[in-house]
Image (spheres, helix red, strand yellow):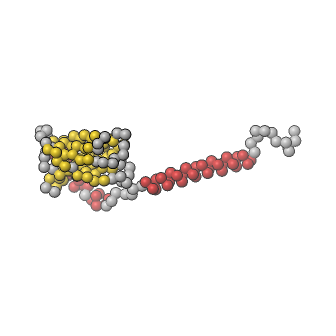
């Protein structure tokens, strides 16, 4: 057999070069897509992180006072209507009325969809709000209850919007 005749199915140098170049082109394309997605969805660092860090001991003191108070909260969320209701009771299961409830809701990984809203008192320790336009999935709900301008209760929970 002469050197000029090539056999079918033989791997030549240009085959290896094409495979190597193709592999690195695919890896580079995937990297570009992943980097673009990561940079475009990154919401940034916590606003005013330094001051929040300095106030951390105060936050711990507030949490200890809240634990001593012994209040409890129960939530119900209707995915179909977007109606959220929260009932606050004290350590004796007595409803706590007269609070001003404010809340923030958002996704865990981004602040793009974050929004704030207020609850209206419904009586018997229950407060309600309509949260329109939530897409399905998990949402993080942060509630602050204040009495005469001073925050007396905080909670953070996940709620699930059914598809």
**To which quarter of the image does residue 91 belong?**
top left
Q: Is residue 116 visible?
A: yes
Q: Is residue 84 left or right of residue 44?
A: left
Q: Is residue 66 visible?
A: no
Residue 30 spot, x, y in % from top left: 55, 50
Q: Is residue 161 left or right of residue 122?
A: right
Residue 120 spot, x, y in % from top left: 19, 49
Q: Residue at (21%, 49%) from the top-left corner?
A: 119
Residue 84 spot, x, y in % from top left: 25, 44
The single residue placed furthest to the front in the displayed view is 81
Residue 17 spot, x, y in % from top left: 70, 49
Q: Nearer the viewer, residue 149 or 14?
A: 149
Q: Residue at (16%, 57%) from the top-left corner?
A: 149
Q: Residue at (28%, 48%) from the top-left corner?
A: 131
In the picture, the quarter occupied by the N terminus is: top right
**To which quarter of the image does residue 158 belong?**
top left
């Amino acid at each position: 057999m002469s050197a000029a005749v090539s056999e079918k199915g033989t791997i030549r140098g240009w085959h290896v070069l094409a495979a190597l170049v193709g592999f690195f082109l695919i890896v580079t394309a995937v990297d570009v897509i992943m980097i673009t997605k990561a940079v475009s969805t990154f919401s940034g660092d916590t606003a005013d992180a330094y001051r929040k860090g300095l106030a951390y001991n105060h936050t711990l003191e507030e949490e200890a006072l809240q634990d001593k108070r012994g209040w409890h909260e129960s939530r119900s969320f209707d995915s179909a209507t977007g109606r959220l209701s929260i009932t606050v009771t004290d350590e004796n299961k007595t409803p706590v009325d007269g609070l001003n409830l404010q809340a923030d809701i958002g996704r865990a990984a981004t602040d793009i969809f974050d929004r704030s809203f207020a609850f209206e008192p419904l009586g018997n320790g229950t407060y309600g709000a309509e949260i329109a336009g939530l897409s399905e999935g998990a949402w993080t709900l942060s509630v602050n209850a204040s009495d005469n301008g001073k925050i007396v209760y905080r909670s953070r929970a996940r709620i699930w919007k059914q598809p």
